Amino acid sequence: MDIAIISGLIILVLLVVMLLAGVPIAVALGVSSVCAILPVMDMDVAVLTGAQRIFSGISVFSLLAIPFFILAGNLMNKGGIAVRLINLAKLITGRTPGALAQTNVIANMLFGAISGSGTAAASAMGAIIGPIEKDEGYDPNFSAAANIATAPTGLLIPPSNVMITFSLVSGGTSVAALFMAGYIPGILWGLACMIVIYFIARKRGYRATTKFTFKEGVKIVLEALPCLLLILIVIGGIISGIFTATEGSVVAVVYSLVLSLFFYRSITWKDLPKIFKDSAEMTGIIIFLIGVSSIMSWVMAFTNIPSAVSAGLLAVSSNKYVIFLLINVILLIVGTFMDMTPACLIFTPIFLPVCTALGMNTIHFGIMLIFNLCIGTITPPVGTTLFVGVKVGKVQIETVFKQLLVYFAAIFVVLMLVTYIPQLSLWLPGLMGYL
């Protein structure tokens, strides 16, 4: 039997067994990868090489952006920006049917982009808007479904840590180009959900009751402006070449700290140690995952697993559109039981060579991959954003999931558009000169 097939089966079987047994995913990745190389390498050499790969995998300067963006997100999460963004979203949605749910969508897009976390968006927005929607007569299941379905949009709209991770594992794809590529797919996701909300809300008679005067509108915009400036300063600075993504992450931390401590005064100096601790813990998990995944990437390259996968897919069909659909289906299934970061680290080296061989741009593939994995965050059995949204909305997962089905259909349509219309991902990077 071919070594690629043997090693691939070892990785797959051991990974599944250890994950089902509750072994931490980083440990499962490392053990399964080392075991997969044993048919062609001695144990002591495999372990030593694995350790070297972990070290080289995390000794990358661009990875510094991840802890800083995590810290900036945590500062902004605690910094009282949710209410200000919700008021701005209310102003934008006006008196459209289901205006409060529409507000939830826009607020999720804004807050998720600033915080870099779908779960944080679902938690913050659901906790604030949910009770208001209930008072206005909205079905709690409808409110929770709208919140859950749109919380991941901020993972596509930059800055996004998973894009930085993809940049590393794909061999140095431009982070700025990936940031630009995420805007249109992320906005389309939100718009698709807003269309669904419009028709459901009009059918159920959910209409807005709040009107803002011109003076109130100006006040709302001015209060939210400092929050939005974070995105403008960081992303604008990166794409204009004023600073790199790593330097931009430091700018985001400084800006978030000043805004939260001195402008909004929503956190105090006493809050900072816990924020730093939480950020360090999250950083440690992600960086260790990246380091361990370097072993798997090396094993896959050494044993030619990507070539075997490519040959297997091409044996099913030579039509690139069929293969892209198969890859989407696999990623959607994977996303239901695996978190975004490890899934990105594992499946990028497997599917990227296949897609690039069929003419897909690396940036386009990255957005397609991240889009799929974002959907996984709101699907059972391991959809973290789904469970957070259910808990915050104080509803049952069974009843909410029924209402989520129509959102899934709309989001899947957008996924197909993103997959088969490359310009949705590549137009902005091309406009900015990254292609």
Image (spheres, rainbow, N blue to C red):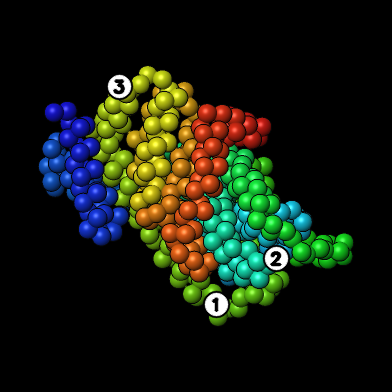
Categorize mark 3 by other alpha carbons within 10 Å: few (<14), some (14-19), many (20+): few
Q: Secondary structure at mark 3?
A: helix
From the viewer's perspective, is the residue at label 3 or at label 1 nearer?
Answer: 3
- Camera-side residue of 312 and 63: 312
Label 3 vs label 1: CA separation?
A: 57 Å
Q: Amino acid at mark 3?
A: Ala
Whether residue 222 is visible, yes or no, is no
Task: Verify CB contact (< 8 Å) between mark 1 and mark 2.
Answer: no
Q: Amino acid at mark 1?
A: Asp
Q: Would you call the spot at circle 1 few (<14 residues within 10 Å), some (14-19), or many (20 or more)? A: few
Q: Secondary structure at mark 2?
A: helix
Distance from label 1 to label 2 (Cα)?
A: 21 Å
Q: Of the two numbered discs 2 and 3 on the same chain, state the one appearing first in sequence.
A: 2
Q: Are marks 3 and 1 in contact (CB under 8 Å)?
A: no
Identify the disc placed on residue 271.
1
- Pinpoint residue 292: horizontal percent, then vertical percent: 31, 50
Q: Nearer the viewer, mark 2 or mark 3?
A: 3
The quarter in which the N terminus is drawn is top left
Q: Please name the amino acid that badge 2 sits on.
A: Arg
Taking the spot 17% from the left edge, 45% from the top edge, the residue there is: 35
Tag of residue 336: none
Residue 196, compared with residue 418, is above or below; it is below
Q: Is residue 136 visible?
A: yes
Q: Earlier in the sequence, mark 3 or mark 1?
A: 1
The residue beneath circle 3 is 315
**Position in image of residue 392 (x %, y %):** 52, 68
Query: Residue lying furthest right in this view?
Result: 214
Look at mark 2 in the image and give the residue it sits on. Answer: 84
352 or 298, nearer to the observer: 352
Q: Which residue appears at 27% of the width and 28% of the height?
A: 308
